[in-house]
């Protein structure tokens, strides 16, 4: 998604195959016998004596006496007097065949299978574009402003940490702040353009850990068809990062992220002040 938005540049690295049996990544290519399916095959040369049409491998023509056709017993000066073609030899069933089958072999469970049965995945390397660097800076600036605001209120602040719910589940959050004296807790999340699901998730986490939630939008918009009930929840304060690099209670609600300038509603300063 970030690459499509020109925030990341992408470069192809390799194609990866995943074992259909055990899920191990990075299956290795191997050739296999066209007759028995064994990967115990080697590329070699198959020779033919034109005088008698006998075909065989090199060791069938070469013995202690030199090069001799095993069929007609004619002595030859060298292997160059024989016709030759590339071939494959299976050491498992001793079959000679022209073209080996393509197979993939799992490094973990050693399954040998057809490439079409494995899951194919293309791997890319990503790096930030200039636009991407600006985007990251905005996210970090917004987070740092939240941190400084909470520290000014003498709260103990943690960045990129986890909070533990009543059931013992650890959930990652961007910012966690705690007033130990008044037992007041705040969690904050920073998004460019938060969707309804992200707002709902933040409120759910806040409810689980008995905290007030701060949502920061770096674009000044939140996205959803019907999110009034979410954004007006008393447990939530929604802020925007201004172009001047400040936080304020001012944002737009849009129903379609592709039309962020279509005004649905502007809500300003309607939330209760935070305590603690």
Image (cartoon, grey):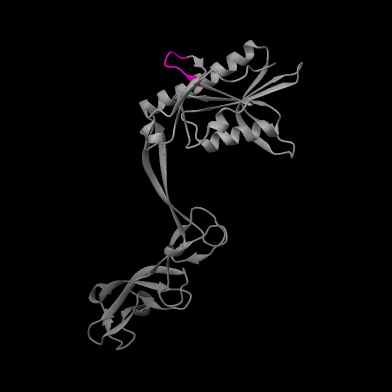
Image quarter in which the C terminus is found: top right
Which quarter of the figure has residue 270? Answer: top right
Q: Is residue 65 left or right of residue 103?
A: left
Q: Is residue 58 above or below residue 174?
A: below
Which segment did they paint magenta? 240-245
Q: Is residue 82 above or below residue 188?
A: below
Image quarter in which the N terminus is found: top left
Q: Residue at x 57, y 27 (%)?
A: 232
The question of residue 195 being in magenta is answered with no
Q: Is residue 272 above or below residue 168?
A: above
Q: Is residue 26 left or right of residue 3?
A: right
Which is nearer the eye, 101 or 123? Answer: 123
Which is nearer the eye, 26 or 3? Answer: 3
Q: Residue at x 59, y 36 (%)?
A: 201
Q: Position of residue 231 (x, y in %)?
A: 55, 29
Residue 85 visible? The answer is yes
Residue 78 visible? The answer is no
Q: Residue at x 40, y 74 (%)?
A: 34
Secondary structure mainly formed by the magenta segment: loop
Q: Is residue 227 above or below residue 117?
A: above
Q: Position of residue 99 (x, y in %)?
A: 34, 71
Q: Residue at x 37, y 79 (%)?
A: 60
Q: Is residue 249 left or right of residue 126?
A: right
Q: Is residue 158 left or right of residue 239?
A: right
């Amino acid at each position: 998604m970030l690459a499509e938005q020109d925030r990341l540049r992408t470069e192809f690295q390799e194609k990866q195959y995943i074992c259909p049996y055990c899920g191990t990544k990075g299956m290795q290519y191997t050739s296999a016998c066209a007759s028995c399916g064994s990967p115990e095959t080697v590329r070699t040369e198959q020779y033919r004596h034109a005088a008698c049409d006998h075909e065989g491998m090199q060791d069938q023509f070469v013995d202690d006496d030199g090069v001799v056709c095993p069929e007609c017993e004619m002595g030859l000066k060298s292997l160059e007097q024989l016709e030759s073609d590339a071939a494959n030899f299976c050491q498992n069933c001793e079959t000679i065949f022209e073209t080996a089958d393509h197979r993939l072999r799992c490094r973990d469970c050693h399954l040998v299978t057809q490439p079409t049965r494995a899951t194919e995945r293309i791997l890319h390397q990503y790096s930030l574009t200039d636009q991407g660097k600006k985007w990251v800076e905005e996210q970090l600036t917004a987070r740092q402003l939240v941190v400084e605001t909470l520290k000014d209120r003498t709260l103990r602040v943690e960045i990129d940490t986890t909070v533990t719910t009543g059931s013992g589940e650890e959930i990652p959050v961007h910012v966690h702040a705690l007033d130990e004296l008044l037992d007041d807790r705040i969690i904050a999340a920073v998004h460019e353009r938060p969707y309804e699901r992200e707002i709902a998730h933040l409120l759910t986490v806040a409810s689980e850990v008995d905290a007030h939630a701060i949502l920061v939008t770096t674009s000044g918009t939140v996205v959803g068809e019907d999110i009034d009930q979410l954004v007006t929840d008393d447990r939530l304060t929604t802020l925007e990062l201004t172009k001047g690099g400040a936080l304020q209670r001012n944002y737009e609600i849009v129903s379609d992220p592709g039309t962020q300038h279509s005004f649905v509603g502007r809500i300003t300063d309607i939330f209760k002040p935070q305590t603690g």
